[in-house]
Amino acid sequence: MKIAVIGASGYTGGELLRLLYIHPDIEIHMITSRTYVDQPVGQIHPNLKKLLDVKFTSFNMDKIGSCDFIFLAVPHKASQAIVPDLLEIGLKIVDLSADFRLKDMNEFEKHYGTHSCPEITKEAVYGLPELHREEIKKARLVAAPGCMACATILALAPLFSEPDLVDPSHVISDAKIGSSGGGKSFNIATHHPERTNVIRPYRPVGHRHLAEIVQELNLISNKPIKVGFSAHGVNIVRGILSTSHVFPIKDLTEKDLWRLYRKFYKDHPFVRIIKQKSGLYRRPDPKMLIGSNFCDVGFDIDPEMNRIVTFGALDNLVKGAAGSAIQCFNLMTGLDETKGLWYPALHPI
Amino acid sequence: MKIAVIGASGYTGGELLRLLYIHPDIEIHMITSRTYVDQPVGQIHPNLKKLLDVKFTSFNMDKIGSCDFIFLAVPHKASQAIVPDLLEIGLKIVDLSADFRLKDMNEFEKHYGTHSCPEITKEAVYGLPELHREEIKKARLVAAPGCMACATILALAPLFSEPDLVDPSHVISDAKIGSSGGGKSFNIATHHPERTNVIRPYRPVGHRHLAEIVQELNLISNKPIKVGFSAHGVNIVRGILSTSHVFPIKDLTEKDLWRLYRKFYKDHPFVRIIKQKSGLYRRPDPKMLIGSNFCDVGFDIDPEMNRIVTFGALDNLVKGAAGSAIQCFNLMTGLDETKGLWYPALHPI
Amino acid sequence: MKIAVIGASGYTGGELLRLLYIHPDIEIHMITSRTYVDQPVGQIHPNLKKLLDVKFTSFNMDKIGSCDFIFLAVPHKASQAIVPDLLEIGLKIVDLSADFRLKDMNEFEKHYGTHSCPEITKEAVYGLPELHREEIKKARLVAAPGCMACATILALAPLFSEPDLVDPSHVISDAKIGSSGGGKSFNIATHHPERTNVIRPYRPVGHRHLAEIVQELNLISNKPIKVGFSAHGVNIVRGILSTSHVFPIKDLTEKDLWRLYRKFYKDHPFVRIIKQKSGLYRRPDPKMLIGSNFCDVGFDIDPEMNRIVTFGALDNLVKGAAGSAIQCFNLMTGLDETKGLWYPALHPI
Amino acid sequence: MKIAVIGASGYTGGELLRLLYIHPDIEIHMITSRTYVDQPVGQIHPNLKKLLDVKFTSFNMDKIGSCDFIFLAVPHKASQAIVPDLLEIGLKIVDLSADFRLKDMNEFEKHYGTHSCPEITKEAVYGLPELHREEIKKARLVAAPGCMACATILALAPLFSEPDLVDPSHVISDAKIGSSGGGKSFNIATHHPERTNVIRPYRPVGHRHLAEIVQELNLISNKPIKVGFSAHGVNIVRGILSTSHVFPIKDLTEKDLWRLYRKFYKDHPFVRIIKQKSGLYRRPDPKMLIGSNFCDVGFDIDPEMNRIVTFGALDNLVKGAAGSAIQCFNLMTGLDETKGLWYPALHPI
């Protein structure tokens, strides 16, 4: 299958190329970039040197028709501008930007500004196969989730999958993320001497991934859920851990939670429940997920307070972006969901 | 003044020695260690080579009387064994272990086991000068606080200093800490290839610093407070950020919080309120505190949810341990509280 | 093909398992460990959880015959003890320990102690396909090279492949390596607070990889070569850069060196020559090699001094260990040399 | 004494301010910056918040006369423009830029371009007190050394302090440096995801610090010395290790080298010779020097090759810049050389 990656020079684009390169059913037919036209891919993504022999071109609607499938790794707002035309000529799309993630246009506009094709948003499917697999299979347009949203939703979803387990109005999600989550644009805040060794609160309130989290948890629970979301930059390049704190409104034992999580994820290959009593790796930690498409989830019950703690860990560039996108691609094109993605993480790293 | 550091070979002991060395009113008279008797201090603490010319001795009650003041940097449980005798001969003590922090013996025993001299615990003062300055001045025995407790308490205290501001039964504290917080004992979990790049949940429930946090917040608020405390190891050596999420039960504006925090800390030199609208350093981050005795605190109000986020950041070995201990020493001996401690952090680092 | 990994619990063993798992022609039939018998592999190598469903067993000569091929990832000296028996029953072996790397028994004994089967060493082939491909194809026993030796030899080999280019008696190799190179055993020197942020000289003279370097360069040049080798631990987990400084005895231009390196590596898929005038990635750097089997080499000519600087970069666990081992396996079993290894590195990381 | 720091917003300027703040004989009278006029120092150097209460002003020759002493922390080429006027009004200066380090104008111009006041260069003293203490005492203008030059020269100087010990034409210096050495300007190469985890060769030939190294070693040895210098960026923020490899032309034992180094540095408080047979800290490593003004030096003799390896380690912002500058200030103003600088490093960090 011939695919194009539009906006392939950033970190998400680079990770897409890495994963597409090793996917057995894909031919990377076209990669575009406004900045690097005519440069070989290895000049920008040094890990692809000698492997992938293709050059960046500029995006051109006339030529895009030779492709079978499109990945959009462009900045927020740039997707809107081309998606209608791409759909028009019958292409299927996974969009990694935020443009088609939110169903509520008010929420979208609050975080990203105006939207030029809100009607298309209606048909777009939120690209979390663990929640929307069947819809994704039939979709023309899938919006891959935000990286922190993905980790947070997957860790919390089971708790809202049955009625009245936990208080929907007091959910706290405290996320920690590596520097690659901020993308390739640099400034003084990303300068190595300034960014190294931080535990830097950023967007402790009002983070735009919150809208996705709430949208999806509302869908699962059929109730309005209030989440307080705070993000922190930590001293790694790749990886997210989202720790959520919820207050049960019903007695829940560890066994109950095991049952709940197992049931919710039993058919989902890329979610592992990590909860061990011994060993070094007892709870989810992105350390053991780098380069892989797994999201590890786990939970603890606080015996001294009426509290459940949940963890969601993933590699923000894989399951949090490019990997989820390819998982959706697989579903949309009738392939096995795990195709080209069933690789172990690197460890140690 | 002649001081002794009992148990001076660990990280807390080493940091005490660094700070005591630069303190103008102190003579380091005796340093003890069970393991390194007769070794020069620079062999164990390489940063003190050529500066501090003293050797480790074994602890000896007969010789300790030649000192004026004792710092105990021994493991939990070892302090109890010697504190009664030290007090008996009229010595003043700052104990950096947990042995005399908790007033409630049930709490103590739950986390640390039996206590051999619970009656002495009654007179011990919790060594957070921002809460107990006057008592510390008069104390014979001060128990320096736990590092994560210190960061968490200082960030939350103002919110409980006036009645009925926030919900006392739903406080969430999500702490992130560097590897030096675990001390000098090593195992596979602290092995560099395994500990690097983690965001590792550890003790997400049942952490023993919680008892200190609750004890002190209860004292401030005169009400029982419930805190859900979860700690995470992150990829730095020094530093703590404790992020707390609380639910107001009364309308609180940013101005109200500014007033509250300013008032609470106006006479406390080592707490800085960090809350800026611009610049790179808008909120507390241990990055800008390494080597210094400051604790930076800050807050944000969540407009979308009834939530206040607070931050407490510090260097776990300084304000979280050795620095607080010396701050207490200064108060106990009638010196200026900032003596020997008024140094800037290293930046960048 | 059914393979066994003997000694599969260390970092090299874990990386072998990761790569063997994704190799299309391999069935991981048996993994052994003295310490972890009956434990599932994911308990020790968390990245393999849910992917590889196999348990550690203890090594047993009676059962090993059911395998077709053996990888030995045991400590130095342990290989010797079993290799004769394994060969006896007709198994082919890649040994990742140092036991069969050195032809000169005096050199071996100087670094590793006595050898119990020196006669077998004679038939063993040094497992660097870039130097010994044809011999490897025919070998029963291949000794995978030391990680720093591999990086250093590949960077220097072209300079000794033609007579009288550089001074054979004054070669300096200054290597930098991440912490995983030291393996899984921990001690105070590998404790995260102590190992982080170092630039730690270790074995500045007398490093045991030197013997391999000299042996192989002597073979290429047909002359005795003197190398001064110094290793430094740096603040990463994976990766090696070996910088060598040599003194030409003949006028050599950049064009000459390009020709020399291109010629030497033209048929070797896993060596890339990195030398660019622009862009961020102008010279070899392990940063862009993590997880991949490439070794990047490069060179610079010093116009102010009669000096050539060469660089060899690789991931010490892949091309420096498990990857080279599988490359040899491919050759020994008639597979394409790149099979199961043709994967891009992770970037950024 | 009233001092001014011209160009105080960079890392070197910030470190100067940190050290000047804790210096007992200094009043920070004026700090200038072109970019941050009227901003409080704590906005740019967050570690100085609440400690140093001063604002940036723009540089103004009319007001500078109210100062007693000037530190120039401006970029290369900017010093030249103001030094003549500053000297004219009788001010003493330590210049941290490269403008007055090199006596040979050809060398200067090769690396930095034209010089507007070469005649002043003649009177400037190279600010390494270990080599030029007496001249510094009498100087009006001192040029603080480059950070890598400082580490390299101090490690090699003893070997050239007596005639015919080592081959002057084959010295190799292989330096490793943290990211703060590149200053505060950011670009894609300093972006955290790109700069983290590198071992990045940069300027393997033609580095401009080489000219300083050669100039100073020539002075010591009275012979022309050839040094091949190669620098590498490594994954730390602060710190340099310069490893040099030299070839003895005379039999030298460890005892000889001990004698040589001890003799050379016996009156120099800030150089420690680190060479231990046991313990964790056997050789120089910047890890144990962060925040301090020490330069640790050490050596090893290679028994298998006619080679001596030397090490020079320091904190590039302290002994490699601001600390050396203040050491010179102390000498120039008749203070004790160690005043305000006699502080231990932070450890662990």
Image (tube, coloured by chain):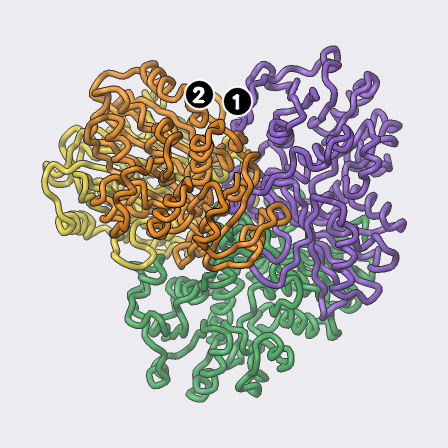
Chain colours: A purple, B green, C orange, D yellow
The amino acid at mark 2 is Gln
Q: Residue at x 68, y 46 (%)?
A: A295
Badge 1 density bin: few <14, some 14–19, many ≥20, Cα 10 Å: some
Residue holding disc 1: A43
**Residue B244 appears in the rendering:** yes
Answer whether labels 2 and 1 touch (C-beta < 8 Å).
yes
Residue holding disc 2: C276
Is residue B260 shown left or right of residue D84? right
Q: Position of residue D289 (x, y in %)?
A: 37, 51
Specify the subunit that label 1 lies on: A
Q: How many labels does the image show?
A: 2
The amino acid at mark 1 is Gln
Q: Which residue is drawn at 34% across and 23% down?
A: C300
Q: Position of residue D247 (x, y in %)?
A: 17, 36
Q: Residue at x 17, y 41 (%)?
A: D159
Please, is residue C197 above or below residue D249 in the view?
below
